């Protein structure tokens, strides 16, 4: 038995519930209604287009097309990460792109090949949804990590310079900020793994159960995807900082001011 369809009228009933929220925002002068409306409209358009597009991708199931779609997803995630971190796109694009690409591809192929044991590791049915879940978490981790790292250095510039003047190398002076950035990025995932199943039933597991899978199978998939997400997020955040540092400091080990928007 497949998942029961949701009608457009049902979706409209949910959208109606947003109206009181917008009224409260207006009354309390919370200036978020414009961004909220923009986000909802953009979500509706994007997901509708993706839904139509994915039907063709799943039907064709062409490995090259699947890989191309994944690359596009990574490019969009890289741009979104940099913009959300309020850093210069031109300076950070390639470091962030490769910091996401490398763990994303390695973990995704490892997952499809050795965990799910697919005959075709580029199968669209697995590659795109699983890749999307891993990528979405890498994006959030990189935003937190980059924000924490660069803005902590900027806000504590005197402390950083003091460490350098005492003879510390750039790496030694950056270690405290690097450590804090990694912890900030991965702590939410660690907390989520510790409470999963008790506080909430996660999306992948719920989706599989609604789709007719046996709960035990859904649980095994959820465990596997959570571990894959944690590993990819950890290394992606680490690489994003390591790769970007080379472009962010001058020859005197000082953070360049032009890295920020």
Image (spheres, grey):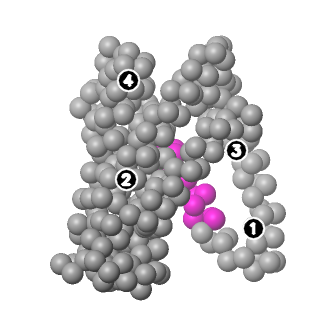
How would you classify the magenta stretch by its main secondary structure? helix
Q: Is the residue marked by circle 4 packed among few (<14), some (14-19), or many (20+) residues within 10 Å?
A: some
Q: Is residue 158 above or below residue 181?
A: below
| Label 4, label 2: how far apart the Cα atoms are | 24 Å
| Label 4, label 3: how far apart the Cα atoms are | 33 Å
21 part of magenta stretch? no
41 part of magenta stretch? yes
Q: Do the residues labelled 4 and 2 touch (CB within 8 Å)?
A: no
Horizontal side, residue 16 vs residue 151: left or right: right
Mark sitting earlier along the chain (2/1): 1
Label 2: which residue?
238
Mark sitting earlier along the chain (1/3): 3
Q: Furthest residue to the left? A: 251
> Quarter holding the N terminus?
top right
Label 1: which residue?
22
Magenta segment boundaries in residue numbering: 36-50
Kindly identify the residue that appears in the image at 44 percent across and 52 percent down.
139
Q: In this view, does 112 lie above or below 103?
A: above
| Label 1, label 3: how far apart the Cα atoms are | 17 Å
Q: Where is residue 56 in the image (x, y as percent from the top left)?
A: 38, 31
| Label 1, label 4: how far apart the Cα atoms are | 43 Å
Q: What element carries label 4?
A: helix
| Label 2, label 1: how far apart the Cα atoms are | 39 Å
Mark sitting earlier along the chain (4/2): 4
Q: Nearer the viewer, residue 87 or 234?
A: 234
Disc number for residue 11: 3
Question: Within the image, what quadrant is residue 95 found in?
Answer: bottom left
Foreground mark, 1 or 4, reads: 4
| Label 3, label 2: how far apart the Cα atoms are | 39 Å
Foreground mark, 2 or 1, reads: 2
Q: Is the residue marked by circle 3 packed among few (<14), some (14-19), or many (20+) residues within 10 Å?
A: few
């Amino acid at each position: 038995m497949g998942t029961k369809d949701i009608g457009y009228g049902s979706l409209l009933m949910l959208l109606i519930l947003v109206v009181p929220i917008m009224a409260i925002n207006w009354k309390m002068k919370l200036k978020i209604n414009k961004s909220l409306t923009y986000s909802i409209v953009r979500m509706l358009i994007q997901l509708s287009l993706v839904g139509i597009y994915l039907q063709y991708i799943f039907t064709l199931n062409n490995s090259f097309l699947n890989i191309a779609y994944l690359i596009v997803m990574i490019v969009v995630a890289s741009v979104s990460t940099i913009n959300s971190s309020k850093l210069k796109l031109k300076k950070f694009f390639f470091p962030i792109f490769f910091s996401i690409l490398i763990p994303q591809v390695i973990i995704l192929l490892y997952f499809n090949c050795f965990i799910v044991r697919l005959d075709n590791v580029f199968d669209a049915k697995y590659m795109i949804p699983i890749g999307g879940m891993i990528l979405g978490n890498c994006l959030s981790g990189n935003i937190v990590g980059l924000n924490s790292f660069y803005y902590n250095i900027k806000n504590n510039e005197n402390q950083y310079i003091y460490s350098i003047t005492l003879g510390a190398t750039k790496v030694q002076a950056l270690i405290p900020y690097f450590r804090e950035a990694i912890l900030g990025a991965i702590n939410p995932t660690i907390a989520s793994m510790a409470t999963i199943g008790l506080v909430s039933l996660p999306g992948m597991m719920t989706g599989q159960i609604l789709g007719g899978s046996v709960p035990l199978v859904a649980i095994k998939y959820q465990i596997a995807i959570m571990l894959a997400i944690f590993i990819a997020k950890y290394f992606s955040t680490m690489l994003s900082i390591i790769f970007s540092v080379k472009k962010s400091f001058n020859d005197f080990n000082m953070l360049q001011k032009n890295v920020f928007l």
